Amino acid sequence: MSIETLSTLMAQKWEEIIKTNPLIKLIQDGVADRRLYVMYLGETYHYASHNAKNQAIVAQSLKPVHSREINYMKYCLEHALEETGHELMAYHDLKMAGLKVPLNELPTALPATETFIAYLYHIAQNGNPVRRLGYSFWAESSYKFFGQTMLLAAQNMKLSKAMMTFFSEHSDIDEKHAEDVERMINLVCKTPEDYEAVAEVMLQTLSLTADMLTAIAGEYQKVLRGESRWNKVFEAHGQELNTL
């Protein structure tokens, strides 16, 4: 297996998600309600707040023998540092979009998001430590697949640049990160089993992300029926939230 094979598998999985995911379909159908975007940002805040932590745990799990393990440990710690606080971009965008909710009153993560978070902690602490790179491999280049959907959401919901810093600024940061991930995969993956472990986690975390997006779409339908925990938050703090 190679970087090219991983890229092909990633593109195929993204194509499947873009074609079938209910949240993406809502955006493609022209939903203009910013509440959907705000709910997406809420889940983004929750999972992003753990990325630096589970990345750092990989470094703790390593048992360096060769220089490549030392370099991988440095990469994990440096990348964890760079990821620290990125969740606050999502929270900033949520507020700029019109939901002035205190952080301690933001609804807790949906079960699908919690499952995604838990899986990342599990792979950080168990099994082949190189496999955490499978998540980083697609996450750092997700904008070239998910970007068109976000741009369409921006158009439908009239989202300004100030409401999309996690998308725009994070994508700029991730261009360098994507190069770093490829370099690290080439450095530390020495056997077919290494590449298979990376591919497995790449595909599994993409599936879990798709599950999270599906759950957001389902929760949005509950909002429309007045049955979601988000309804009270919107009523209490969403006076500036333009649902168009």
Image (cartoon, rainbow, N blue to C red):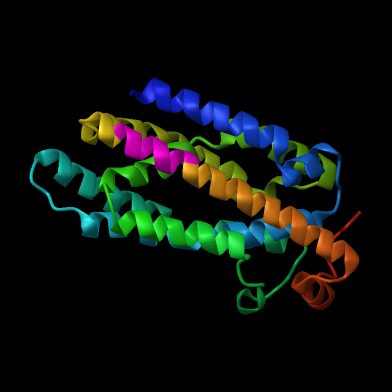
Q: Quadrant of residue 123?
A: bottom left
Q: Quadrant of the N terminus?
A: top left
Does residue 116 appear to the left or right of 43 in the view shown? left
Q: Is residue 45 above or below residue 207?
A: below
Q: Which residues are magenta?
A: 195-203
Q: Is residue 55 visible?
A: no
Q: Is residue 145 visible?
A: yes
Looking at the image, which is closer to me, 11 or 52? 11
Residue 160 rendering spot, x and y as whole percentages: 75, 47
Residue at horizontal 24%, vertical 55%? 59
Residue at horizontal 66%, vertical 78%? 105
Looking at the image, which is closer to me, 220 or 163? 220
Looking at the image, which is closer to me, 167 or 189? 189
Asked if residue 202 lies in the magenta stretch, the reply is yes
> What is the count of numbered marks?
0
Looking at the image, which is closer to me, 234 or 18? 18
Residue at horizontal 26%, vertical 47%? 128
Residue 164 rendering spot, x and y as whole percentages: 66, 48
Residue 111 rendering spot, x and y as whole percentages: 60, 65
Q: Quadrant of residue 13?
A: top right
Give the prevailing secondary structure in the magenta stretch.
helix
Residue at horizontal 31%, vertical 32%? 195
Asked if residue 17 lies in the magenta stretch, the reply is no
Residue 205 rendering spot, x and y as whole percentages: 49, 46
Q: Quadrant of the C terminus?
A: bottom right
